[in-house]
Each structure stands twice: as C-alpha cells, then as structure tokens.
Image (tube, rainbow, N blue to C red):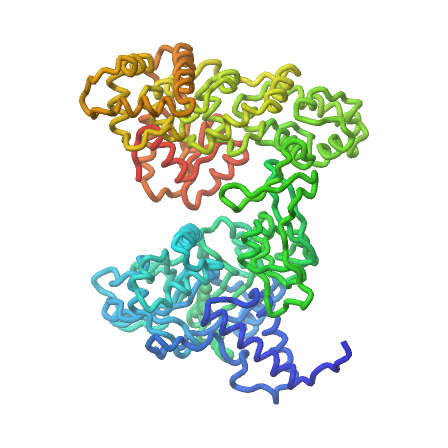
C-alpha cells in the first residue's frame, strides 16, 4: 500500500459510516454484517479517536446514541423514562476498575452488594401496566422512542396480561428481555425449512424477527419468552429500597425473573459469578453474552447517577466473543468411516473465545453453495464450548477478485475411487469401501473407541502408524499384534506396548451390543446395537437373520433394517467377523432371544414388514393385514388357504384379498423370503425363555432428571414402574438408563461420567410408545 493514512476527520467519518451501516443491518434488518466483536472494536476505535479530538464529536455519532431507528410500520412510542444503555467491561481488570470507581464515588470502604444477572441476548422491551392491566408493550428503539408492539407482546405466554394479586400498583412499567430458547429456535428453523421460508442465523435474530411481525398471529406461533430485569415507573406503592427487592416484588406480581440472578458482595464474588456462568453457558437453554452487575441499594444508585445515557451503577461484563473474522485459505476433503466426504476449512489462524482456530467445518457442499463461500473469502467463524468450530458465512464485501469457487472432487482424495452422491443428495461418499485407506483407518479407530470396544491406548495416531506400516489391514488383525510389533511406535515404551496387548485381550469379552456398535454398520448407533443384541440374544442369530426380521426390532425402520442386512450380506464383512471370532473375540450376550421380541412376531407383523419393504400389497390396509394374520395364524396356514384357492371369507377380509396376496407373493422373491423369515422366527421363538410373565424392565433401575414437557415426572415414573423398572433419585454404576429432560444438571453429568445410557425426552417418548404406552 502506498496511500497515506487518512486524516483523523476522515477516519472518524469512515468509521461512523461503517458502524451506522452495521448497526442498521443488525437492528433494523436483523441481518448482522459482522460479528459483534468486530462492531465493538470499531466502536472503541471511534471512541478513542473522538476522545483525542473532542472537536470532531458530533451529536449524530454512533458513540452518542445507542440502538437504531424504529421501523416505519409500527406506531412510535416515546418512553416516559428513557431506556438506558449499559457500559461494557471486557476483562476482569476492567471490572475491578468499575468496582473501584463505585467505592470512590460513594466514598465507602465496605464491600458493595451487587445484583449479578446473566445478560440475556435477546431484545429489550418495556411493558406498561395500568391498574394491573397490560396496556402497552414497546421495543427499546433508540432508547428515547421505540415501536408499539403491544399486539405482539400480548401473544407471549410468559408476559402476564394482568398482574397477580388484588392490589396491583396503579402504574408499573417494567423492562426486560425477550428471548427465544434454543429448543424452540431449532424447532422454528426446522419448520421454516420445511415451509421453504428463510431460516434464522441465531436465536436473537429469530426473536427480533418474530417481535417485529406486523401480523401478531405469526408472533404467537413463535416460541418467545420474557425475563424482567428493571423497573422504570411505579405508582400507588412505595419503591423498594434495593434492586433485589424490586425483582422480588416483580416476581410476586407474576413477572418472570431469571432464576440465575444472585446477590454478590464484593468484586471477588462478582468474578466468581461470571466465571461460573461462563462455564455453564452452553448448558443454558438461551443465549447469554455476558453478565450485568447492578448496585443493589437504590439510594446508592441515585447518588451514582448517569454518564450520558448509561447508569454509573451498572455495567455489562461481556463474554469473550464466540464469533470472529478470518480468511479461508483452502478447503480439504476428509473421508470418514462411512466414506462420507466432509469439507474442512483451512483458516488463517484466529483467536475465538480464547482458543486459536485454524480448522473449521463447512458441513457439506450444499451448505457451501447456499452460503456462497469461496476460497479467499473473509469468513465468520463460530465456536461454542467444546464443539468443533464452524464457518457460519462469508462477508461478500471483503471478497478478493481472485476468490475461487469450491468444488466437490470427482475422485476420492485418498484412494482415487469415484465419489457418489447418496439418494438424499446431500452426502457425497467415496465408493472405495475398505479399499479406501481413509475408511479402513476410520473403521479401525471407531472399533477401538471408548464407546465401542474401548481399547485403552489404541488412539488415532497409533492406528495411523499401524496402518502405515502395514501391520494391520482390518480390525481382526489387531488381535494378532504382539507387544514387539507396537513397541517403539508413536513413543510406545515396552510397558505401554504390554498394556495395549492386555487391553486388546480384555476387549475380547465385551458385550455383544458394544461389539455390534464397534463393527461400524451404517446407521447403527449404540441404541440400535443394544436393541439388536437384546432382541436376538446372540451374534449368530443376527448374522443369519433375514431383512424382514430386523423390522421387528424396536425402533428399527426400513433404512436401518436394510443397512444391517446389507452389512452382513457383504462377504468381506463376514470374513472380518470370522477372523475376529477365530482370534478369540467372544461377545457376551444373553444367549437366547428376548421374550418380548419373539412375542411381536406374527403373521400380520411379517406381512406388514413385507409391505414396508416393497411387497406389492397396495390397497390392502393395516387392518386387513391384521385380520388376515389373525384368521390364518401362521404362514403354513396362509399358504394352505392360498393353494386351496377357496373363496372362503372371514370377518374383516374382503373377497379378492387372498388373490391379491397370492399375486404379490409371486412378484419377485417374496414367497421364499417370507418362508425363510417365518422359519427363522419359529426357531427364535422356540429358543426364547418360557416365562413370558416378566415385564420388560424388570430388575432395572432408571433415573429421571431435568424437566419433561410432554408428561409430568410422576407420569414418567408411573409408566416406568408399570414396565417393571425401579425409579431412583441418584445415578450410580447400577443405573440402567437416565432420562434427561430440559436443563438437566449434575445427574446428567454423572451419567455421562459413568457411561450410563441417556435418553432425551424425544427418545424416551419413543421408547414408551414402543412399549405400548402412548404419549403424544
Ligand atoms: O439481560 C439483559 N440483557 C439486561 C439488559 C439486564 N439483565 N439488565 C439490564 N439493565 C439495564 C439497566 C441497568 C440500564 C436498567 C439490561 C439493560 N439495561 C439493557 N438492555 C439493553 C440495553 C440496556
């Protein structure tokens, strides 16, 4: 660059223009142009410049105002008491300065009591109640004038239309934040996508977009929530002496106050609150972007007063940014265990929330197209908690001329095999299967992983080294390894080599469900692996089972059933499994099929399964199949009837039904397939335990935690007990399963630690439905 640095006046002018533009896009359009952190930096740069050149400060500078113009379409509302803004602290030290200033101004030495509140990342609104009745809701707007959104706020369930109690104040104006919870946000985006409407980038935008609807019926369908955090007007009763007493009074009037809010005495308590909630941030069901601290005593608030439009008695302590800008240098294609290709963004390293990020996920090629991301673009990277950072979008204004489009490769970057798009069109896969080194490697890593065979010491690097040196080719080869083969690899000493061999030895006696999961069958997660193992009872039965029988396993649908059958039909897989068994792997299993499983088999269920798999029973409904099944009772009886060509009719079976069934059986190979499935079913039935009086969860202990939305805890408990389970209050190694509702806490953590199987509410309801208990 050869151009001179612009004059301070020019720099200020440019900064204001940029900030105004960003602010308009954030507030008015709900389409942020840059991450908040970038805005904050620009704002601070402008503040610094204006401080150095006070003569250049003008009333229309973004530093002199907060928020932005209201939209034209709504009525404007002048706030009788202006809605103030908050000054920010970005570090512990800046917060210490704040506390110091409070002490100096008040001239007190004792520790000051503050109220610490999570800073909800939603939309600030003001609600006016007259004689207990909600008469107006308004947005913050620029703090002086907002928009009248009364009709919209009336649709939010956590906003009372009338205050509680016989003696409401004659006038009460309360301020708070409207947010959209994560659960509702995801659901909304799913709905939007289905309706081919635009999806929202984050819950804050979704909340803003929902509140700014001119049609309140749309707002009503959006999952919004309100939390009160300050009082602006109060008439008809005396003002409480402290902010915490105000919150208590608001709560008593039925206004929702965030349950995380706490009183904290002294700076160290404030910092402890901040770091605690920062650590728990990802587990809250709403976004927060920091903490707000407020001096509790109202007389002290009055003494402290304001600077421009921010109170001196309050401050927002911001969390480190979760979004940052950087440049996309290249895109690599990674091949996963199932051959799926995932694009990985190679980024110019950047600090996001205190961690250097140089790789991020780009999801899939469709997402890249949709977001129009190109190599060379400046992109927004988002990182939350421990999850993999992701590229959220590109900033088109900063696109260089030589930016390149991103293409899906035609050939696998690892093995050169052809790349195919699956039926759903989204996932691109390498067709190389186990020819592909990447898939082989990933399959072995998955086999060894903690939730699969849990082979201690066999990490990703070691697998890479073993494959690179041709010491192993598939998972069965693992059990032929000797200590001397691995000693010396990847800094493996003799001791760790011995340990690895011992860990392999120990893994031979893992449960059948772990073993099945470890095989890496497409679509088979831990839950399905467990259901398969429990239902069939041993590996050989599963290997021999025809596709039709897989559909009888709880929660197994057509796609999953096909994937299981396809896996065992593949010769190579059979060879590997035989190799494992020969090497001494001995999956532990009940040894006999589950009574509840074989009880499901019937002629009707078999015909139903065949129909789902494509047997041409068009026009024959569930009820008719049920009647046919009940009437003939077994496959041989049905066959006899078909051969006899009787015109026999039975209740619920229309004339011609049998002919249709006969015709369908002769299309393709349905006759032998049903024949074989029936035989297998009979074999399993004969091997199942006699006593079928037991209930499915006999002997199991379950734990419920968090809040369930579709049933009460008591109902959940009653259902579980009806299935034979005990419901306990705490998690231990003996716990069979944990049901985790909304905002589950330490019990959930403990369940994870102990590796106890966890069901969320959806899965739990599904489970109950699968056991004949209906919950909608
Ligand atoms: O949770 C929040 N977003 C929040 C915002 C909060 N808990 N308290 C707040 N308190 C104030 C004062 C101290 C000025 C009454 C605020 C805000 N203001 C605020 N929200 C948007 C601008 C200012």
Question: Percent from the top left, x then y, of residue 737?
Answer: 44, 30
- Place residue 712 in its image quadrant: top left
Q: In this view, does 315 lie to the left or right of 449?
A: left
Question: To which quarter of the image does residue 625 belong?
Answer: top left
Count of numbered circles in the view: 0
Residue at figure coordinates x 51%, y 78% from the top left: 307
Where is residue 674 drawn, in percent x and y?
A: 39, 19
Evaluate whether residue 263 shows in this view. Answer: no
Q: Which residue is drawn at 52% across and 27% down?
A: 566
Quadrant assignment for the C terminus: top left
User: Quadrant of the image for the N terminus?
Assistant: bottom right
Residue ID at (46%, 21%): 546
Instruction: Please tell me which residue lies in front, 390 or 764.
Output: 390
In depth, the one of 308 and 263 nearer the eye is 308
In the displayed orientation, state which residue is furthest to the right.
Answer: 488
272 left or right, relative to 169: right
Quarter of the render that holds ligand 1: bottom left
Q: Who's the residue at 64% across and 46% down the image? A: 410
Q: In this view, does 704 lie above or below 303?
A: above
Residue 413 falls in which quadrant of the image? Answer: top right
Q: Is residue 442 above or below residue 365?
A: above
């Amino acid at each position: 660059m050869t151009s001179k640095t612009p004059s301070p006046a020019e720099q200020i002018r440019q900064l204001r223009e940029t900030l105004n533009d960003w602010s308009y896009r954030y507030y008015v359009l709900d389409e942020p142009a840059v991450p908040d952190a970038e805005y904050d930096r620009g704002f601070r740069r402008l503040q610094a410049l204006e401080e150095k050149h006070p003569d250049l400060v003008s009333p229309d500078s973004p530093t002199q105002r907060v928020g932005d113009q209201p939209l034209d379409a709504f009525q404007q509302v002048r706030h009788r008491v202006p809605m103030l803004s908050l000054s920010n602290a970005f570090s512990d030290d800046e917060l210490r300065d704040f506390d110091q200033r409070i002490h100096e101004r008040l001239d007190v030495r004792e520790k000051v009591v503050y109220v610490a509140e999570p800073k909800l990342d939603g939309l600030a609104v003001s609600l006016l109640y007259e004689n207990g009745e909600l008469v107006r809701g308004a947005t913050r707007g620029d703090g002086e004038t907002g928009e009248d959104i009364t009709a919209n706020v009336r649709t939010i369930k956590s906003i009372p239309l009338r205050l509680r109690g016989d003696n409401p104040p004659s006038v009460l104006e309360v301020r708070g934040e409207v947010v959209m919870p994560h659960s509702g946000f995801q659901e909304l985006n799913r709905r939007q996508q289905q309706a081919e409407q635009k999806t929202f980038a984050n819950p804050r935008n979704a909340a803003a977009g929902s509140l700014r609807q001119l049609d309140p019926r749309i707002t009503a369908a959006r999952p919004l929530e309100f939390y009160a955090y300050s009082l602006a007007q109060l008439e008809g009763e005396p003002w409480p002496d402290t902010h915490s007493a105000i919150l208590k009074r608001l709560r008593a009037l039925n206004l929702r106050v965030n349950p995380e809010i706490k009183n904290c005495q002294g700076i160290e308590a404030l910092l402890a609150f901040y770091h605690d909630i920062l650590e728990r941030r990802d587990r809250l069901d709403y976004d927060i972007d920091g903490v707000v601290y407020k001096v509790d005593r109202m007389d002290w608030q009055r003494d402290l007063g304001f600077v421009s439009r921010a109170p001196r008695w309050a401050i927002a302590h911001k969390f480190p940014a979760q979004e940052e800008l950087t440049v996309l240098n290249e895109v690599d294609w990674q091949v996963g265990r199932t051959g799926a290709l995932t694009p990985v963004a190679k980024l110019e390293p950047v600090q996001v929330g205190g961690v250097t990020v140089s790789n991020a996920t780009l999801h899939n090629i469709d997402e890249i197209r949709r977001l129009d991301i190109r190599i060379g673009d400046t992109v927004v990277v988002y990182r939350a908690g421990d999850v993999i950072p992701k590229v959220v979008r590109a900033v088109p204004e900063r696109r260089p001329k030589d930016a390149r489009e991103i293409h899906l490769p035609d050939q696998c970057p690892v093995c050169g095999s052809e790349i195919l798009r699956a039926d759903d069109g989204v996932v691109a896969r390498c067709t190389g299967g186990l020819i592909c080194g990447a898939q082989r490697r990933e399959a072995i890593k998955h086999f060894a992983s903690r939730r699969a065979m849990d082979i201690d010491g066999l990490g990703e690097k070691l697998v890479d080294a073993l494959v690179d040196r041709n010491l192993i080719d598939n998972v069965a080869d693992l059990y032929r390894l000797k200590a001397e083969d691995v000693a010396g690899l990847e800094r493996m000493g003799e001791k760790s080599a011995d340990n690895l061999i011992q860990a392999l030895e120990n893994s031979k006696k893992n449960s059948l469900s772990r073993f099945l999961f470890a095989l890496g069958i497409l679509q088979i997660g831990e839950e399905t692996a467990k259901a398969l193992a429990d239902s069939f009872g041993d590996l050989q039965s599963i290997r021999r089972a025809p596709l039709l029988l897989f559909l009888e396993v709880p929660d197994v649908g057509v796609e999953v059933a096909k994937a299981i059958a396809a896996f065992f039909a593949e010769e190579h897989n059979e060879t590997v499994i035989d190799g494992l068994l020969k090497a001494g792997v001995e999956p532990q299993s009940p040894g006999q099929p589950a009574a509840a499983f074989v009880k499901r088999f019937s002629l009707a269920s078999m015909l139903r399964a065949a129909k789902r798999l494509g047997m041409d029973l068009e026009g024959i409904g569930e009820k008719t199949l049920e009647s046919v099944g009940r009437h003939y009772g077994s496959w041989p009886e049905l066959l006899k009837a078909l051969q006899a060509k009787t015109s026999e009719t039975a209740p619920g079976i229309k004339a011609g039904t049998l002919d249709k069934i006969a015709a369908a059986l002769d299309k393709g190979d349905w006759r032998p397939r049903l024949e074989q499935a029936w035989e297998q079913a009979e074999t399993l039935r004969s091997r199942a335990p006699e006593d079928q009086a037991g209930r499915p969860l006999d002997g199991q202990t379950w734990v419920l935690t968090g809040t369930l939305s579709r049933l009460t805890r008591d109902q959940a408990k009653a259902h579980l007990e009806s299935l034979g389970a005990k419901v306990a209050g705490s998690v231990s190694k003996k716990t069979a399963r944990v049901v985790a509702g909304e905002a589950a806490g330490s019990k959930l953590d403990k369940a994870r630690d102990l590796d106890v199987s966890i069901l969320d509410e959806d899965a739990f309801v599904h489970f109950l439905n699968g056991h004949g208990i209906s919950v909608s």
